[in-house]
Amino acid sequence: MKLTDTTLGQYTVENVLTKMGYFMKKNKLVHGVGITDVDYVVHKFETIGYVDGKRKQKLIWFYLTWQHMLQRGYSSKYKEKRPTYKDCFVNKEWHLFSNFKSWMQEQKLEDKEGNKLQLDKDILFEGNKEYSKEKCIFVPRYINTFITDRGAERGEWPIGVCWYKASGKFQALCNNGKGKQIHLGYFNDPQEAHLTWKTCKHKLALQYADELAKEGYDSRLVEALKVRYL
């Protein structure tokens, strides 16, 4: 029996699990909504061998990615610490672990060095709050950092701009996503500083889009970067 969004609409959670030969109380749901609908025990870690008598383990990436996504969508404590996730939610289809895992297995999940990519919900659709297969994509860590808008930290000025007391002017800084803040100069007008920041971000985005295209990344990611800072 394959569980889908329609199935959830027809049955209660308990009935769905009973049909699969399971029984799970509501307090066993992952973050109140997630159903681990697989016929094996899900662990966060998997034993991959022993070295000098010590067990070596690796993370079960599919499950942890799903769990962390549900946390962002439904954990009140998480949302309290990270207000930008306040209105985020997960499409009902992905409340089922098997559905999310099937989708994830079809995605590009590592970069050319073997580093794991990160699940992103708003690079394809800026400002998006829904985690779903239509709107999510895996991206390199530096891309996730590059596009992050830390609005809560920048205060009253436009993004990319801060007041530099020592000069009595506005300073423009551009985060390149790779650990470097590029100093773009000082300005009398905060809007001018912001436009300078935007120009820098667009130039970098085009550079990254070209690099990702050559590495075989999803064309949707490439095109989204090209227009992100227009």
Image (tube, rainbow, N blue to C red):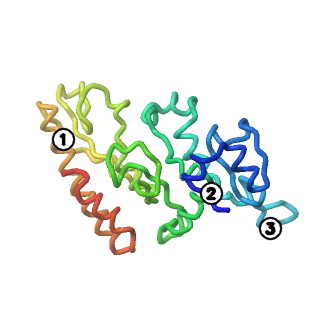
Circle 3 is placed at which residue position?
49
- Specify which label sits upstream in the sequence, 2 or 1: 2
Secondary structure at numbered mark 3: strand
Residue 3 numbered mark, or none: 2
Residue displayed at 52% across by 40% down: 73
Residue displayed at 34% across by 55% down: 124
Q: Tell me: residue 56, above or below residue 146.
A: below
| Dot 2 amino acid type | Leu
Whole-percent x, y for residue 55 in the image? 82, 60
Q: Which sits in the foreground, 176 or 128? A: 128
Left or right: where 133 falls relative to 155 = right
Q: Tell me: residue 207, above or below residue 164.
A: below
Whole-percent x, y for residue 119 in the image? 48, 54
| Dot 1 amino acid type | Gly
- Specify which label sits upstream in the sequence, 3 or 1: 3
Left or right: where 128 falls relative to 190 = right
Q: CA distance from mark 3 to mark 2?
A: 34 Å
Residue 185 numbered mark, or none: 1
Secondary structure at numbered mark 1: strand
Q: Quadrant of residue 99?
A: bottom right
Whole-percent x, y for residue 192 in the image? 12, 38
